[in-house]
Image (cartoon, grey):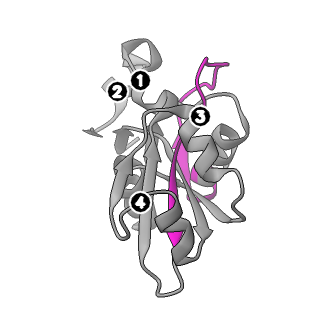
Amino acid sequence: MKILGIGNAIVDVICKVNEDYISANNLEKGTMKLIFDENHFKKLLSNLNIEKTISGGSVANSIVGLSQLTNEVGFIGKVNDDDLGQKYEDGLIKENVKYLYSKKNESIPTGSCLILITPDSERTMCTYLGTAGKINDNDIDAKIVKNAEITFL
């Protein structure tokens, strides 16, 4: 493989909302906020209509771009063996990225970024790292890293 990316596996969850949703949840329009409490994140998501989910995270986004330029690429990022984890894997495979992480049943869910789009097309993001933020050396096969020409972290 030419290029290997290792980073936070974050599912972008895109939802259209009105201005009232932003103010009712004490969010600052047009910003990105880290959410550390899983229950708070679930509450934000609970009554929203999901428009689309996309495999994301800054390293994965770069790897997808490199794939679109016809490079042989792979990605390692930690997800849970849950619905969003499967969507994450499927999304990368669809983009011709070799997903090189074996999902496991984790104690916390797959990381996600709630992207709230208001009628004026402004986006407000709420990111819950979930299990993505727990990636460690036990999640990475050293042989894969050694065989890559370039490793992007």
| Residue assigned mark 4 | 27
Numbered badge on residue 116: none
Task: Please tell me whether mark 4 sits on a helix, a strand or a loop.
Answer: loop
| Residue assigned mark 1 | 135
- Residue 56 lies in magenta, yes or no? no
Residue plotted at (54% across, 43% down): 98
Type of the residue with mark 4:
Leu
Task: Please tell me whether mark 3 sits on a helix, a strand or a loop.
Answer: helix
| Disc 3 to disc 4, C-alpha distance | 16 Å
| Disc 4 to disc 2, C-alpha distance | 40 Å
**Labels 3, 1: front one:** 3
Mark 3 or 4, nearer chain start: 4
Q: Marks 2 and 1: in contact by CB < 8 Å?
A: no
Residue plotted at (61% across, 67% down): 15
Mark 2 or 3, nearer chain start: 3
| Residue assigned mark 2 | 145
117 over 42 or under it: above or below:
below
Residue plotted at (37% across, 37% down): 7
Mark 1 or 2, nearer chain start: 1
Type of the residue with mark 3:
Asn
Q: Marks 4 and 3: in contact by CB < 8 Å?
A: no
* Other-residue count near label 3 (Cα within 10 Å), few / some / many at <14 / 14–19 / ≥20: few
* Other-residue count near label 2 (Cα within 10 Å), few / some / many at <14 / 14–19 / ≥20: some
Type of the residue with mark 2:
Val
Image quadrant occupied by the N terminus:
top left
Q: Report the magenta residues as a range.
A: 92-117
Residue 72 on image: x %, y %:
44, 51
